[in-house]
Image (cartoon, rainbow, N blue to C red):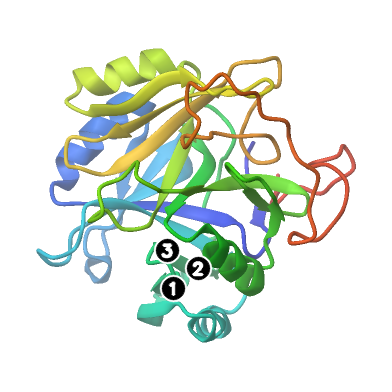
Amino acid sequence: MKVTRTIPGSPCWAQLSAGDPEAAQQFYGQLFGWTAERDPDPQYGGYTTFLLDGVPAAALAPLMNPQQPVMWLLSLSTTDADATAEAAKSAGAQVWMGPMDVGPLGRWALLSDPTGAPFAVWQAQQFSGFGVVNEPNSFGWIDLSTRDTGSALEFYRSVFGWQVWPSDDYPMVGLADTMFGGVMDMGDMFPPEVPAHWNTFFQVADVDATAATAAALGADVLHGPETVQMGEGPRIAVIRDPQGATFGIHTPAGPDPAPGPGRAGPRPGRGRGSGRRWERPAVGAGGGGSGRARAASSPSIYTA
């Protein structure tokens, strides 16, 4: 769907930091059909917007220093970056940069949550973020890997007002009765040196074909493709691009038209291949609201 507005607290942007921006443009252009539009203003340091059919889908920025990691960075929408950064800090987050103005486009801050996962907040002015979501080759889901799911869920609930759909295996999160992500306990699935992190998933028409294309372009397929064992579960894969940034791809396996915002999404965590079926839980006491996610009358987090 095309997007004109995102409610506060929702995912609003995904930005790739890469050491070789030209190579990244070629890789994602061939993988997702994105075109690249570089901002000519030198104050933005070569910031490039990835467009899908002329609409903003994601972004690319060169590394600013040798210590900066190659990664996809998630941004959450806010109406007041300063107040949100202060609230996040009071709730145990680390504020690394900002809040700061990004020209007339908006106001931005870089943080990490109390479990160490980096993310940004974005206060839109001239630029609001995603222009398209929940369509092939556009944003569709976020997945947090952390060693303290309880602290992470409480942080995002208290600072951003997220609802939580409880689960011992993979609690899901969202707003306005609309799921847009999940939280996974890293456990022993990751080496101890791997920190908590968000993973951005892009919806595609065919996970297997897209994963094969990524591999042919020099990427590593870290997980999958596989169909998640859940009712009408999506098919997923996790990929590391040629420069080292990790992201996910997903596509619905059942008749539901999309597993992205508002539907059960990727679950690339514990229990993979276990044969267990997952049933969408009702909103629990920790999440606010009532009933099941995304009833027909429920508002979307994105306005077309």
Residue bearing the label numbered 2: 122
> Which amino acid lies under the numbered mark 1 shown in the image of this protein?
Trp
In the displayed orientation, state which residue is furthest to the left.
Answer: 66
Residue bearing the label numbered 3: 119
- For mark 3, give the secondary structure: strand
Marks 1 and 2: CB-CB under 8 Å? yes
Residue at left offset 66%, top offset 45%: 167
Q: Is residue 139 left or right of residue 97?
A: right
How crowded is the residue under tag 2: few (<14 C-alpha within 10 Å), some, or many (20+)? Answer: many
Marks 1 and 3: CB-CB under 8 Å? no
Does label 1 or label 2 sit earlier along the sequence? 1
100 relative to 201, above or below: below
Residue at left offset 59%, top offset 79%: 80
How crowded is the residue under tag 1: few (<14 C-alpha within 10 Å), some, or many (20+)? Answer: many
Residue bearing the label numbered 1: 108
Q: Quadrant of residue 64?
A: bottom left
Q: Position of residue 209 (x, y in %)?
A: 38, 13
Residue closer to the observer: 142 or 26: 142
Q: Position of residue 165 (x, y in %)?
A: 71, 49
- For mark 2, give the secondary structure: strand
Nearest to viewer (mark 2 / mark 3): 3
Q: Is residue 161 visible?
A: yes
> Which amino acid lies under the numbered mark 2 shown in the image of this protein?
Trp
